[in-house]
Image (tube, rainbow, N blue to C red):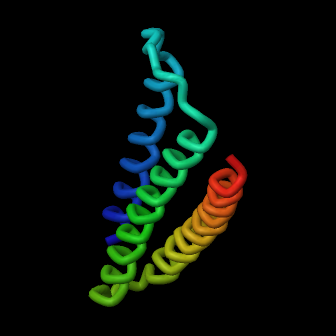
């Protein structure tokens, strides 16, 4: 059980690192059309929503593992759930700020 959680966290961390490294080292210049700040913020909002959904899925999986577990290491799982809840809460707060900025930008073209 503990090994599964550690592997899940490691895979997430390594995957995120690979994506960030690939993004930073991408030397290919892509021609992007002029994107307005509103569109950039809209895209950012959509990405935040996807991240939040992914974190919620991980949280549900961890809670299910606790419900199904009779392991003595439940405290570590509870701590991981608390961390995920804080991350989700922070993402929601940031998402609300983005939505507010989007509504202001839309009302003031």
In-front residue for pair 4/63: 63
Determine the residue located farthest toward the left in the rendered image: 68
Q: Residue at x 38, y 67 (%)?
A: 58
**Residue 45 appears left or right of 7:** right
Res. 62 image quadrant: bottom left
Residue 44, above or below 65: above
Q: Position of residue 24 (x, y in %)?
A: 53, 22
Res. 94 image quadrant: bottom right
Q: Count of labels shown? A: 0
**Residue 60 appears left or right of 68:** right
Quadrant of the drawing holding the N terminus: bottom left
Q: Position of residue 40 (x, y in %)?
A: 56, 40
Q: Position of residue 15 (x, y in %)?
A: 39, 41
Q: Residue at x 34, y 62 (%)?
A: 3
In-front residue for pair 62/28: 28
In-front residue for pair 53/81: 53
Residue 18, above or below 41: above
Q: Residue at x 67, y 57 (%)?
A: 107
Q: Residue at x 55, y 74 (%)?
A: 85
Q: Position of residue 4 (x, y in %)?
A: 31, 63
């Amino acid at each position: 059980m503990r090994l599964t959680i550690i592997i899940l966290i490691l895979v997430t961390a390594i995957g995120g690192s690979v994506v960030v490294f690939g993004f930073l080292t991408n030397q290919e210049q892509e021609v992007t059309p002029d994107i307005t700040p509103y569109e950039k913020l809209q895209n950012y909002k959509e990405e935040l929503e996807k991240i939040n959904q992914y974190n919620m899925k991980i949280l549900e999986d961890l809670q299910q593992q606790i419900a199904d577990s009779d392991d003595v290491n439940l405290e570590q799982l509870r701590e991981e759930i608390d961390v995920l809840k804080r991350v989700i809460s922070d993402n929601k707060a940031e998402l609300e700020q983005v939505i507010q900025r989007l509504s202001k930008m839309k009302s003031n073209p």
